[in-house]
Image (cartoon, helix red, strand yellow):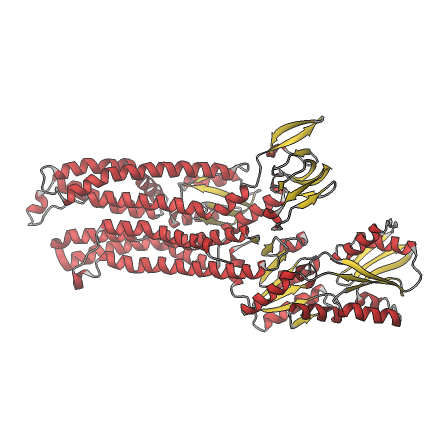
């Protein structure tokens, strides 16, 4: 069985959607590659491959042969990419500036001093640096693609400008060829060079705007300190973060960012965790408490013992999740990819056809018109606008989500969320605070110390949120756990242990029924009272004898009521599922304003409930935080985990709400709708631009109005079309969630 590895590698030297398609095709043709996807907006390759078949070095070599560069270094790959992109941006800036220095006097010569002696020769001299130096990358890249039998935007620019330039050179040195045929020997040096100048300017603006789409990632990375103070033999030594290892002792001073995940070993302080958890109030940290990388230490100083370092920290995983999500493709993007894959060959065909039609209907008298129209078609066509429409919107949307503590794992989830019309929510830890406390304790027989010790031993092994309440209560009472011989978790019901060859159990009323234990009338009255108050009930017994009834209260979050109301106002039906009894479920549902709920649900019941809603034609989002929610999360159309829940729920879920604030849920739906609306806007304008621009450039209006599009205007339109798409995507940053 092959073991697939998933990686994100930065790609350099991509200029357009055609480049992205070329890299993608090259990568996916390699043996050992399961799936490769290129994101033009972030200049990254997201790839799943079998390292036993394909090495990163072979992958890098294949991409290099295709005319691009791949950064395969694991450490500081993003920093290397940023440095290279800044270098490229500076080079592009200088080329653009110098191109216009030569183009502006050429425009004056062609428009004002066109009758001056040797004007054509002077324009030729001015055009040469623009063609050979400032625009040389278009011709070099076009040649590389031609050798591979491929094409991209560089092909269109190189072909159009070289045709205009060579035609002008011919007319400069052999004007009599046209004069003898009764035609004027026009030159188009200004058109060829203005095309290059405008395309360079457009690329410069596009690079600058694209840089802003990854601002969320840069902000997250800014939370990662570069160095740490490690304690060795009682002395502090500053080392790079990459050199830290598990169990290292690290000194953290007031005002510093915490470098790794770990536990406080010495000292105490208050730590601002708002960038990770969203909680505005600094959390007190003392010996044994967990601290996270990227959070900020406030007043006190302490020593922490490293538990997770480097790529294992919570912050590093958040950054990785956002990067992977930004590299994924929405379903609509796959259609666009197919279009951009054939875009350049189709445009080349239209250009040739335009020239032929002009010559057929106009003859040699219209040769200049035919040439200019063919060139204009090549110049005005813009695959970049189509290629950038979806990824830029997704990058901004996913980045904005991350800055609002909404982690989106893939683009499919973001696009799917807008269709959701039913939300299924788990109660404990999702709608409630998730900090349950024991409010009442009823003993069916005389309370014995050994019973508490057995119960503590059992609950210490349980991962259920209610178990922590019992553990905390017993530990406060200074109870020590008994030594038990076996432990079994009974999914959806509770736990069972063996102590001194006797079976003890703790769980819900399903487990009570299973062991056929009876409840006294007095306890039954109290249980009904507790359930009406919305409290959860845990039964503790030995074989068929009930020993104790424990009432646990878990307050409903104040934001849950607002979140449910907001979702309802958005036209989304909310359902509540819980393993609690009917009375408790009814009380909580009433408090939250939820009319549809289901009590006493097992994990398979939750999954079946989601399936039932789907069978009714509903698009379902499941929100949960525990292991018992993982089946339903996997079944739902969109799965959402609460970040303070278990790792398995977060692994299964498509979206993670990092904080415990359920108001993030309606915000996630708003973000989905905003982002998808933006994608559709971008695609509409990109398609419309090409659908209108190409026929206009071909001369469609010439027979009716005598209008012919100048290649210079065509190049300006092409240059700013992709910029407008990126700027439209960036507008999402200013929209309210």
| 87 over 156 or under it: above or below | above
Q: Position of residue 295 (x, y in %)?
A: 61, 42
User: How many labels, in total?
Assistant: 0
- Indicate the quadrant where residue 526 lies: bottom right
- Indicate the quadrant where residue 442 lies: bottom right
Q: Position of residue 408 (x, y in %)?
A: 55, 54
Point 35% across, 48% down: residue = 152
Q: Position of residue 210 (x, y in %)?
A: 42, 47
Q: Position of residue 265 (x, y in %)?
A: 73, 37
Whether residue 69 is visible? yes
415 lies left or right of 612:
left
Point 59% across, 73% down: residue = 616
- Indicate the quadrant where residue 105 lies: top left
Point 74% across, 57% down: residue = 465
350 lies left or right of 636:
left
10 lies left or right of 360:
right
Whether residue 1 is visible? no
Residue placed most toward the observer, 721 or 584: 584
| 40 over 692 or under it: above or below | above
Residue placed most toward the observer, 448 or 19: 448
Residue extending farthest front:
299
97 lies left or right of 6:
left
Residue placed most toward the observer, 512 or 436: 436
């Amino acid at each position: 069985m092959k073991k697939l590895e998933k990686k994100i590698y930065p790609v350099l030297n991509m200029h357009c959607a055609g480049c992205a398609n070329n890299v993608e095709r090259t990568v996916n043709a390699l043996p050992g590659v399961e799936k490769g996807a290129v994101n033009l907006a972030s200049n990254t390759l997201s790839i799943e491959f079998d390292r036993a078949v394909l090495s990163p070095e072979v992958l890098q070599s294949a991409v290099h042969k295709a005319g691009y560069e791949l950064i395969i270094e694991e450490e500081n790959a993003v920093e290397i990419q940023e440095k290279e992109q800044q270098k490229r941006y500076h080079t592009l800036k200088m080329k653009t500036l110098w191109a216009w220095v030569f183009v502006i006097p050429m425009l004056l010569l062609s428009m004002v001093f066109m009758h001056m002696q040797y004007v054509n020769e002077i324009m030729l001299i001015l055009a040469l640096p623009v063609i050979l130096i400032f625009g040389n990358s278009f011709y070099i890249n076009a040649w590389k693609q031609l050798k591979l039998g491929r094409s991209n935007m560089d092909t269109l620019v190189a072909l159009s400008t070289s045709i205009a330039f060579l035609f002008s050179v011919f007319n400069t040195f052999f004007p009599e060829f046209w004069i003898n045929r009764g035609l004027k020997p026009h030159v188009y040096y200004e058109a060829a060079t203005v095309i290059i100048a405008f395309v360079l300017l457009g690329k410069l603006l596009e690079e600058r705007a694209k840089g802003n789409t990854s601002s969320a990632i840069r902000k997250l990375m800014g939370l990662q300190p570069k160095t740490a103070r490690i304690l060795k033999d009682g002395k502090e030594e500053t080392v790079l973060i990459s050199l830290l290892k598990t169990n290292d002792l690290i000194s953290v001073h007031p005002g510093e960012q915490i470098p790794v995940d770990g536990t406080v070993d010495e000292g105490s302080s208050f730590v601002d965790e708002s960038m990770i958890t969203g909680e505005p109030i600094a959390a007190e940290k003392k010996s044994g408490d967990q601290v996270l990388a990227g959070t900020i230490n406030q007043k006190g100083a302490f020593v922490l013992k490293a538990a997770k370092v480097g790529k294992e920290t919570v912050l590093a995983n958040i950054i990785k999740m956002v990067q992977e999500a930004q590299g994924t493709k929405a379903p609509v993007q796959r259609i666009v990819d197919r279009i951009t894959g054939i875009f350049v060959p189709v445009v080349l065909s239209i250009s040739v056809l335009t020239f032929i039609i002009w010559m057929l209907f106009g003859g040699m008298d219209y040769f200049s018109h035919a040439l200019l129209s063919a060139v204009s078609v090549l110049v005005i066509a813009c695959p970049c606008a189509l290629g950038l429409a979806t990824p830029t919107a997704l990058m901004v949307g996913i980045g904005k989500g991350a800055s609002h503590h909404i982690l989106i794992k893939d683009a499919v989830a973001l696009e799917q969320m807008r269709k959701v019309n039913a939300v299924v929510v788990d109660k404990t830890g999702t709608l409630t605070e998730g900090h349950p406390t024991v409010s009442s304790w009823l003993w069916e027989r005389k309370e014995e110390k050994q019973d508490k010790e057995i119960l503590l031993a059992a609950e210490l092994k349980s991962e259920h949120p209610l178990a922590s309440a019992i553990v905390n209560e017993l530990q406060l009472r200074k109870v020590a756990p008994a030594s038990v011989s076996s432990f079994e978790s009974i999914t959806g019901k509770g736990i069972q242990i063996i102590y001194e060859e006797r079976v003890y159990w703790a769980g819900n009323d399903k487990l009570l029924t299973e062991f056929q234990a009876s409840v006294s009338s007095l306890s039954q009255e109290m249980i009904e009272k507790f359930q009406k108050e919305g409290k959860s009930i845990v039964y503790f017994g030995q074989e068929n004898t009930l020993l104790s009834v424990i009432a646990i209260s878990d307050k409903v979050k104040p934001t849950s009521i607002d979140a449910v109301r907001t979702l309802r106002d958005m036209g989304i039906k909310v359902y509540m599922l819980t393993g609690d009894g009917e009375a408790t479920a009814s009380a909580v549902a009433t408090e939250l304003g939820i009319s549809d709920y289901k009590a006493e649900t097992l994990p398979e019941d939750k999954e079946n409930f989601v399936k039932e809603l789907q069978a009714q034609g509903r698009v379902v989002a499941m929100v949960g935080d525990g292991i018992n929610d993982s089946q339903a999360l996997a079944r739902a159309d969109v799965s959402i985990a609460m970040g303070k829940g278990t790792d398995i729920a977060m692994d299964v879920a498509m979206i993670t709400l990092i904080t415990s604030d359920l108001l993030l849920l309606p915000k996630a739906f708003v973000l989905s709708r905003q982002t998808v609306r933006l994608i559709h806007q971008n695609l509409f304008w990109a398609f419309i631009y090409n659908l209108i621009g190409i026929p206009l450039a071909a001369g469609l209006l010439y027979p009716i109005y005598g209008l012919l599009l100048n290649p210079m205007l065509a190049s300006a339109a092409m240059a700013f079309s992709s910029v407008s798409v990126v700027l439209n995507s960036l507008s999402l940053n200013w929209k309210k969630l």
